[in-house]
Amino acid sequence: MSEAEVTRVLVVDDQTVVREGIVMLLGLLPGIEVVGAAADGEEAVALVERCHPDVVLMDLRMPRVDGVEATRRIRAAHPQTEVVVLTTYADDDSLFPALQAGARGYLTKDAGGEEIARAIADVRAGAAGLSPQIQLRLLERLSGPPAGSVPGAGKPVGRPGELPDGLTAREAEVLALIAEGLSNAEIAQRLFVSQATVKTHINNLFAKTAVRDRAQAVSYAFRHGITGTQQ
């Protein structure tokens, strides 16, 4: 693999043994270069400024600045840097704030090296890097109406009058495919349209739903029941 194809990764975890273990694991994976390691979110923000990683592998519960706030700061200042959460926790109070802060990937710490590498590659390609466990958690969230849910959430897509924020049926279809983790090229192939058309739909639905990136779009899709299982 050429130097241009190597993904530069910053590891963030407050537990020394975990942090060093992740660094060692990533060092064994082809196409990945660890450019730094941080013990908390504040250090992570500073290291991103200094090292310019492609992907940050981010823990959530840390002293000084937690992973959600660090993700928010990193994505605001360095939108070209992707964040994949690697945490012990898969509860709603951890998952959704992280996605809303700008994380494109979310894994739990029982993930193996292959799964971590795949998530890193997915977010670099513009897709969501969600583990099967996290995808299942999101689907479980849809199994019943959450507290404070908005009217119409969880209804099947396809009837324009029931779609939130003025989404068209085709925009909702594209959003559902984003939630499945498909790339623009895969969406274009699935819908038999050009990638330029897919990008237009994505730009429109991002503007209507006020999401900033694909990870937030995934969160939005699951909150509103716009998923492949609902079509």
Image (tube, grey):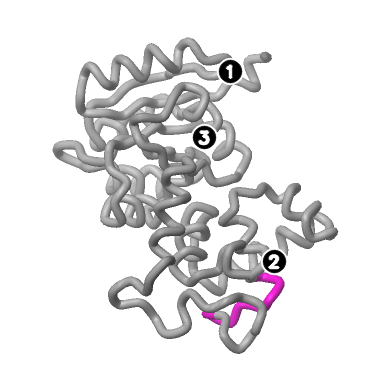
Tell me how far mark 1 sits from mark 3, CA to CA: 13 Å
- Give the labeled residue for mark 3: 119
Tag 1: residue type? Gly
- Give the labeled residue for mark 2: 201
Instruction: Name which of mark 2 and mark 3 comes first in the sequence.
Output: 3
Q: Nearer the viewer, residue 126 or 22?
A: 22
Which type of secondary structure does the marked residue at label 3 adopt?
Answer: helix
Q: Is residue 193 visible?
A: yes
Which residue does the image show at 49% across and 17% down from the upper left? 33
Q: Main secondary structure of the magenta part?
A: helix
Q: Residues within 10 Å of mark 3 (few under 14, many from 20)?
A: many
Which residue does the image show at 28% across and 74% down from the upper left? 147
Q: Position of residue 129 (x, y in %)?
A: 51, 41
Give residue 86's quadrant in the image: top left
- Label for residue 31? 1
Tag 2: residue type? His
Which residue does the image show at 29% across and 15% down from the upper left? 20
Q: Does residue 231 lie above or below 134 as drawn?
A: below
